Amino acid sequence: MAACSIEDLLAKAEQDEAEKLKSITVQKELDLEFDIGNLVAYDKNRIDIRQFREQKKEDFLRSLARDNTQLLVNEIWKHPTERVEEVIVVKLPEPTTPLPREKPPPKPRPPTKWEEFAKLKGIQKKKKTNLVWDDVAKNELHRLRNIARAQKIKVPGVGLTPTAQQSKTDLARAVNVAKSSTASAGKFQDRLPKEKAPRNTGKKRKFQPVIGNFSNEKQRQLDLLKVLDSKKPRLDVNKAVNKQMREDDREESAAKFKKGGKKGRKGGNFSGKGKGGGGKGKGKGRAGGKGQGPPSGKKGAGKPGKR
Amino acid sequence: MKQYGGVIKPKTKRAKRFLDNRAPKLTENVKNAMIMKGGNTSMTVTQALKDIYALKKPSAVLYKKKNIARPFEDSTSLEFFSKKTDSSLFLFGSHNKKRPNNLIFGRLFDFHVLDMIELGIEKYNSLSDIKSSKCPEGTKPMLVFAGDAFDHENEHKRLKSLLTDFFRGPVVPSVRLAGLEHVLHFTALEGKIYMRSYRSLLKKSGCRTPRIELEEIGPSFDFILRRTHLASDDLYKTAHKQPKALKPKKKKNISHDTFGTKFGRLHMQKQDLAKLQTRKMKGLRKRRGPAAAAVVAGETSLKTTEVE
């Protein structure tokens, strides 16, 4: 009993499938050959001439075309599809029919003079990578910073420290910095004939928008008032004292190092050193020449916080 | 600077790009077609040329003026034109008493004539005659060749290849499913070739693949095969030579067996089996004295592993 019903079920399922596919199945004696890469189908079946003559020509041709196109489309739909920007496209394989080329395949071009020379000398092409994280520059900067800290002079800005490979932008920046480090901040510096003015310089000021966050503005104004009101100094005494102490320590250690290291040296070196140190950057006004300058009068808390 | 046949040396980058586009390449451009009229043409022929130009746009040029030339006798002017416009397909239409409404389809290789096939128009319905909405220009058509003549007869085989070359359009890696609208159907029957152009409508069927309904749009021709000038076999072979670089690279050390399993081969260096690192089993450790034989899984130098 159960077996019967299973058979019936299967038969029914088959029937349903056949029904579904009825609209797209086409009966042909010989299967068509397809070249999906070119969207071509070759139908090799013999055409019944009598049928052709009986029917109206156009209708016969149209039904033949419809059947063949249906088979071609069935074949195309078997290929994998993908979704590209809200459109479903089918990925076509390579075309299989051999078609003649337009022009003969390209001949390998003769090596240029440089290529010949390179081959002769055994020079290989070195691939330059696009953007490399420049660790050297970073190291260089840190190294100079350390030196400056040890010698108490300011470190030069970006672009002036010599690096292995300087890019166009680095060089441009260095040129600009050099140009503007004159007494009048580069205002009267002559430019090269075709050089353009640098456009990114100038002070940047940022203002709050006029009508923005009302609560923020209110808060800011109230804080300002509070600061004005309070009688406490706007100075973190602790911080200032610690900073001062650290600087004093540094000065002492530097002085000790100097004394210890320069036992046999002539005095002349001192001046040279001083000048060199001052010329390096915005020198801190080292009292150049022999001996140390008088220690600048530094008193504790009362001074406004140094930057 | 590259030598460009010694004739023109480009002085600008744009000129260089233009000449490089026309130079022989590994993967070639779409073949351009030049459509021209002969010394004497009839209304049918001019209209037919215009319609085929519409089918082949934008990779076609239609010449308006008449060219007094006979392709079957002297093809130098054709070759000159092809060099000028960088076209390797041509369609020459003419009309005289002996051969009325004549169309010559041809193709060139390296700017020399490869194949030429002459077809006479017996019946013709133009695009404008058939009133229906047309496909947008530039759609890649589906081509169908029906009839056993296309398989058995030599001239028909060449004609099939020529027509495929002519109408196939650019070779693309993928095609929009909804954009498969245009169908060109060629039927070879009783020495005649019927060309029909339809617009395919994709109708809903029960399953994923749609049902096709056709609507005739484009020009319909009833051709009769006249003269042919086919290329010699060796020229044909040379024209089909593909550069080696285009051949698909074979992956070494991968093989498939009959069940479809993929196998890979690993090549190992020679290993000292005594010093092989296996699981440490205390009982198997080398003892000083009467040594116990070490049990080592024997692995040959060539391993065959199953790769999924």
Image (cartoon, coloured by chain):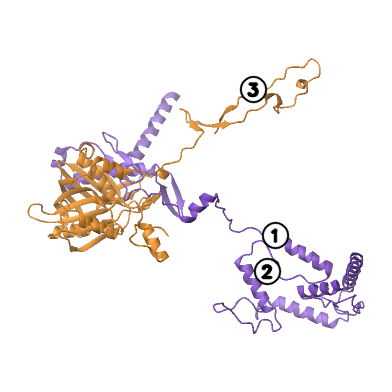
Chain colours: A purple, B orange
Is disc 3 in contact with disc 2, using a CB cutoff of under 8 Å? no
Viewer can see residue B47: yes
Mark 3 Cα-neighbour bin, 10 Å: few <14, some 14–19, many ≥20: few
Q: Tell me the quarter of the image containing the N terminus of chain A.
A: top left
Q: Nearer the viewer, residue A232 or B297?
A: B297
Given the current orientation, which residue lies at the most extreme left position?
B97
Residue indicated by mark 2: A159
Gap between marks 2 and 1, in whole Å?
13 Å
In the rendered image, residue B45, in percent from the top left (x then y), is placed at: 15, 57
Which residue appears at 36% of the width and 34% of the height?
A15
Is disc 2 in contact with disc 1, using a CB cutoff of under 8 Å? no
Mark sitting on residue A136: 1
Q: Is residue A247 above or below residue B99?
A: below
In the rendered image, residue A259, in percent from the top left (x then y), is placed at: 92, 67
Q: Is residue B262 left or right of residue B104?
A: right
Q: Is residue B158 left or right of residue A54?
A: right
Tell me the element at label 1.
helix
Q: Tell me the quarter of the image containing the C terminus of chain A.
A: bottom right
Viewer can see residue A70: no
Q: Nearer the viewer, residue A259 or A41?
A: A259
Tell me the element at label 3.
loop
Mark sitting on residue B298: 3
Q: Chain of mark 1?
A: A
Mark with earlier residue (2, 1) = 1
